[in-house]
Amino acid sequence: AQSVTQLDSQVPVFEEAPVELRCNYSSSVSVYLFWYVQYPNQGLQLLLKYLSGSTLVKGINGFEAEFNKSQTSFHLRKPSVHISDTAEYFCAVSWGGSSNTGKLIFGQGTTLQVKP
Amino acid sequence: DAGVTQSPTHLIKTRGQQVTLRCSPKSGHDTVSWYQQALGQGPQFIFQYYEEEERQRGNFPDRFSGHQFPNYSSELNVNALLLGDSALYLCASSFRGGRGNTIYFGEGSWLTVV
């Protein structure tokens, strides 16, 4: 079965430090990759997505992610975090021919805790 | 331009009851998907509606059903509620045509079953 694994349930980091949130998925065949952020008591907001082309994807709020087909990974990075980045981050994958079908498989989530 | 809107935002139901959750997709979107997010978990795909038909379904029992209306809005119905149905229910909308279109999520409906 297709699956998405976020390797860290919690990542504590000090403000202005770099951070990497790790994501691996089960198959590299025709995948579309996404990172979403969820602030407390809110829905999901898209940070960035990979459909094809350059393996380095830039998103909103200074985040970027790199698609690594051989390692089936899509790790999220930010060079300098702010207190306001404290939130839950979800990696999601869509398999198959369409990136618009709305069927996403999500990881369990990583809680990013930015400390002053 | 309103995004994806869901109602109600919070509700409490008793075991065995039935619940209906509603979703209006973002303007221009024709596909609606529903997800269940239990506390501390990632969202899980329930099903998807396009052209008023269920197109894909996740691993959820028949107690979970839905509907899509001609204006693309959608309802999620859950019958015979169980305590384990307590979760945040998220609606997502997208446009099926083209490629690479963003999937937008609503704020969700918090369901508590007591």
Image (cartoon, rainbow, N blue to C red):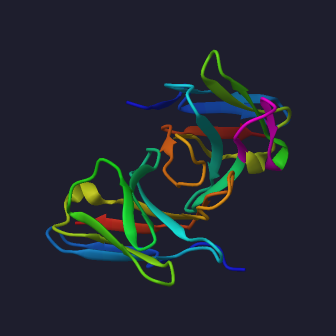
- Along the viewing direction, whichever of A28 and A92 lies nearer the viewer: A28
**Residue A21 seen in this snapshot:** no
Magenta residue check for B75: no
Q: Residue at x 48, y 38 (%)?
A: A108
- Along the viewing direction, whichever of B3 and A38 lies nearer the viewer: B3
- Along the viewing direction, whichever of B91 and A1 lies nearer the viewer: A1
Magenta residue check for A52: yes
Q: Is residue B88 left or right of residue B1?
A: left
Image quarter (top left, top right, bottom left or bottom right) of the C terminus of chain B: bottom left
**Residue B112 seen in this snapshot:** yes
Q: Residue at x 78, y 40 (%)?
A: A116
Using the image, determine if residue B65 lies above or below residue A3.
Answer: below
Q: Is residue B36 left or right of residue A72?
A: left
Q: Indicate the position of residue B46 as horizontal and vertical percent values.
A: 37, 55
Q: Residue at x 48, y 50 (%)?
A: A103
Q: Is residue B77 left or right of residue B44?
A: left
Q: Indicate the position of residue B44 as horizontal and vertical percent values.
A: 41, 49
Q: Indicate the position of residue A37 as horizontal and vertical percent values.
A: 64, 49
Q: Which residues are magenta?
A: A48-60
Q: Indicate the position of residue B80 as horizontal and vertical percent values.
A: 15, 67
